[in-house]
Each structure stands twice: as structure tokens, then as C-alpha cells.
Amino acid sequence: MENILLGAIIAFTITFYAIPVIIQVSNMKKLFDLPEARKIHANPIPSLGGLGIFAGFTVGLLLMVNLKDPEATNTFQFYLTSFLVIFFFGIKDDILILTPFKKLLGQMAVAAILIFKANLVITDMQGFLGIGQIDHTMGVCLSFFTITVIVNAFNLIDGIDGLAGSVGIVTASFFAFFALMSGDHYYALFGFTFSAALAAFLIYNYSPARIFMGDTGAMLIGVVNAILVIHFINTAENTGILPVLASPAMGFGVLLISFDGYPSGLCHKNSPRPFPFFSRPESRTSPVAR
């Protein structure tokens, strides 16, 4: 429990103090999102907030994770690798702009690491949508789809100040709280440390935003939540302290709040790139968007 609290404090502190430095450097190097006709903000705003989130989250994890935990021994290196991969794809997209195909390749690479190395595979839908236990091949395909959709969902809703970060805090905290109540401190550390980093970022992101998280932050939120929800689906029913029946329905239900932005993002008549991994957060035209 102390490790979880300390991890959250470290993540919050590092992110909180890193963001002003990132804002200053971004302004000096002109690394920001420029105003356009379809954007609300009138002044150039840095879009590298994901760098601060990543720094706070990963440092908090590295300092506080208990590598003697069997689950950590088997998965932590692969989780950390997936965070690094999505970070490099995201930061390149925020600075140089990646093609949609390259961005999708990065997301698929992360999904492959999580599925084939960390063994993060959905094995049983427990009656959700009329589906019970599934074979390994179907589980791999479903897990690929789940990870990619969740990453793109958060990437898509990052068009409104504070929305992606707020939703990320709610979902990650839910899964972390369940893990904590179930005695699973490893995944509780993941969720609460990440939520703390997002909370520090949101101090600078709520309207009028001083910085945006960019694809770096949005896709990282998606990867972390994909890990947490798939772990929740696979373990919630069998936990001895707080068993949950139909965990896929509950897990996906919690994440559905992040999918509310999909219809407008997919169908907006003014959008030149209608699919999730084809859209950039800054291009959406919600009345309350940036």
C-alpha cells in the first residue's frame, strides 16, 4: 500500500514540475499547435504534454514496482517496452506528424508486444454478447481489436480540453481500486500512478489550456487502460475478495464513456479523415473543442 501511495506522489510531482519546463521549451523551439479556422484556441499552444505524463508515470513505476511479485516478473519489462514504443510513435507524430498507416503500425506493434510477450489475451467473455470461453486464436484477434480500439478511442476524444485526461483518470482509477480491493497491488500501482500523473497534467490542461497532451499522452492513456481492462476481464470473476460476474460487460461498460466521441469523430461531414487512426485531435470541430 505504501508503494502505491509513494508511486502516485512521485508521478504527480514529476509531471507537475515537468509540464512548465515543457511549455517553456516548446515555446522557445516553436513546438506547438497553431491556431486554424477549425480550432477554438487563438494562440499557439504546446502539444507535448504527453512527455510530462510519460515521465511521471514511468519514473513512479520504476521506483515503486515490486519485481519480486510473480506477475511483475513475467510482465513488467514488456509493459514498459509497450509504453516506450507508443511514446516514440506519439512524440514523433506530435513533432513531425506521422502518416495514419505508420501510426497504426505503431499501435499494432504495441498490441503484439502485449499479446505475445506479456500474454495479455482475453480468454473468456463469460456470456457477454452470448460468448463464453474462446480459443487462443480468437482471443488473440479479440485482444488485438480491443487494444487498438481503446488506443484510438482516447486519441479521438483528445479534442476537448481536459476530456481525455479526465476520462483516463476515471477509468484507470476504477480498475486500480478494484485491483487494490482484490489484493492485486501490482495493477493497483499501475492505475493509481497513472491517474496521479494525469491529475498533475490536467492542472495545466483545463480550459483555457496552457498545453495539450498530444498523441503521446492520448495513446499512452489508451495503452494503460487496455492493459487494465483486459487484466480485469481475465481475473475479476475469480478474485476471492471481490468477485465480479460478467466482468467483460462491466469492463467494457466503464470504457464506453470514452467512446462517446466516436460518432461525431467518425461522421462529421467536415472531417477529411473520418476514421479514428486517421484523425488528429487538433482537427476536430466540436463547439467546445480547442
Image: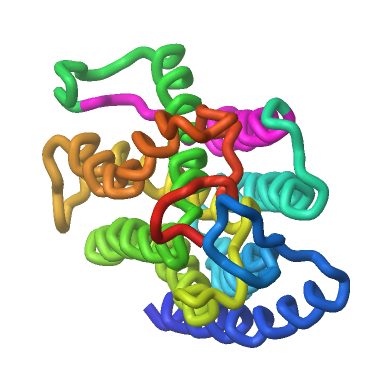
Residue 242 located within the stretch drawn in magenta: no
The stretch of residues the image draws in magenta is 102-125
Decide if residue 117 is on the left or right side of residue 128.
Answer: right
Residue at image coords 63%, 63%: 50
Decide if residue 86 is on the left or right side of residue 151.
Answer: right
Helix, strand or loop: magenta stretch? helix
In depth, the one of 35 and 241 nearer the eye is 35
119 relative to 33, above or below: above
Residue at image coords 40%, 60%: 288
In depth, the one of 65 and 87 nearer the eye is 87
129 relative to 166, above or below: above
- Mark yes or no: residue 174 visible: yes
Residue 103 located within the stretch drawn in magenta: yes
Residue 279 lies in quadrant: top right
Residue 139 pos. (x, y %) = 40, 20
Residue 225 pos. (x, y %) = 43, 50
Q: Which residue lies furthest to the right in this view?
A: 29
Residue at image coords 56%, 49%: 281
Residue 54 lies in quadrant: bottom right
Residue 126 pos. (x, y %) = 18, 27
In depth, the one of 85 and 96 nearer the eye is 96
Decide if residue 3 is on the left or right side of residue 63.
Answer: left
265 relative to 77, above or below: above
Q: Which residue lies furthest to the front in this view?
A: 37
- Mark yes or no: residue 186 visible: no
